[in-house]
Image (spheres, rainbow, N blue to C red):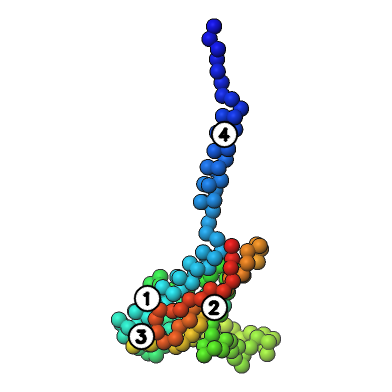
Amino acid sequence: MKRQRGFTLLEVLIVVSMLALTVAAVVVSFSGPNAKEQAEDTASRFEVAFNMVSDYAVLNQAVMGLHIDGNSYCFVMLDENDKWHTIDDQALFRKTTLPDDYRLSLQLDELPWIEDPGFFDDELFDEPNSFDELEQDEKEPVPQVLILPSGEFTPFRVNIAYEPKFSDELPLLITLDGHNDLPLIREIAGEAE
C-alpha cells in the first residue's frame, strides 16, 4: 500500500506569505509618486520650460515674457506691432495649469506680485458692462517677467506651494530663484511624505 503525501501546514503558510509579500511589493511599486516627487516634478517642468523659452528668445532675437496667474503660467511673445500674444502652436508656450493642491506666487525685487484690479472693479459697479467683458476676453496676458534677446531676464522668485486639502500629507514649498542668469536656483522647504 502506497501512502499519499500532501503539503504540510508549514509549506502552505510559507507559500501564502511569499504571495502576500509579492502582492504588497507590486502594489507599492504601482502606486503613484508621493507628494514631494510630484512637487519636484512640477518645479522641474517649470524650470525646463523657462530655460527653453530663454534659449528661444536668444536664438530668435525675440522679446518673451512669463505671465503667472493664480494656479497657472504661460509664456508670451512681443510681436512686431509691440503687442503681447500667446503662442498656441507650440506646447512649450501654452498655458499650464497646476492641480488644485498647488499654488503659484511670484515675487519681483523681494515684493509679492499683486494684480491691480483697476478702476472698473466689480465691487465699484453693480452691473458689469458688456463692452468690458468683451474687451477682457480678447486681452492677451501681459508678462510680469521679461526675457530679453540678450538672454537677460527680470529678476524673480517663483514659489510653488503644495498644500494638500484632503490628505494627511505635509505641505511643501519649492522656490525657484532667477537673478539675471540661468540656471534657476531651487530651494525646498518642508517635507511631504
Q: Are marks 4 and 3 in contact (CB under 8 Å)?
A: no
| Residue 14, numbered label | 4
Q: Is residue 98 visible?
A: yes
* Whole-number angstrom distance, CA of label 2 to CA of label 1: 20 Å
Please give the residue where the numbered disc 3 appears in the rendered image. 151
Q: Quadrant of residue 131?
A: bottom right
In primary-sequence order, the first of circles 2 and 1 is 1
* Whole-number angstrom distance, CA of label 2 to CA of label 4: 51 Å
Q: Are marks 2 and 1 in contact (CB under 8 Å)?
A: no
| Residue 159, numbered label | 2
* Whole-number angstrom distance, CA of label 4 to CA of label 3: 64 Å
User: Residue 130 at what x, y percent from top left?
Assistant: 59, 84
In primary-sequence order, the first of circles 1 and 4 is 4
Residue lying at 44% horizontally and 86% vertically, measured from the top left: 179
In primary-sequence order, the first of circles 2 and 3 is 3
User: Residue 39 at what x, y percent from top left?
Assistant: 53, 68
Q: Are marks 2 and 3 in contact (CB under 8 Å)?
A: no
In primary-sequence order, the first of circles 1 and 3 is 1
User: Residue 169 at what x, y percent from top left?
Assistant: 63, 64
Please give the residue where the numbered disc 1 appears in the rendered image. 52
* Whole-number angstrom distance, CA of label 1 to CA of label 4: 55 Å
SS for tag 2?
Answer: strand
SS for tag 3?
Answer: loop
Residue density around tag 3, few if under 14, some if 14–19, many if 20 or more, within 10 Å:
some
* Whole-number angstrom distance, CA of label 1 to CA of label 3: 11 Å
Q: Nearer the viewer, mark 1 or mark 4?
A: 4
SS for tag 1?
Answer: helix
Q: Nearer the viewer, mark 2 or mark 1?
A: 2
Q: Which of the pair 121/132 is nearer the observer?
A: 121
| Residue 88, numbered label | none
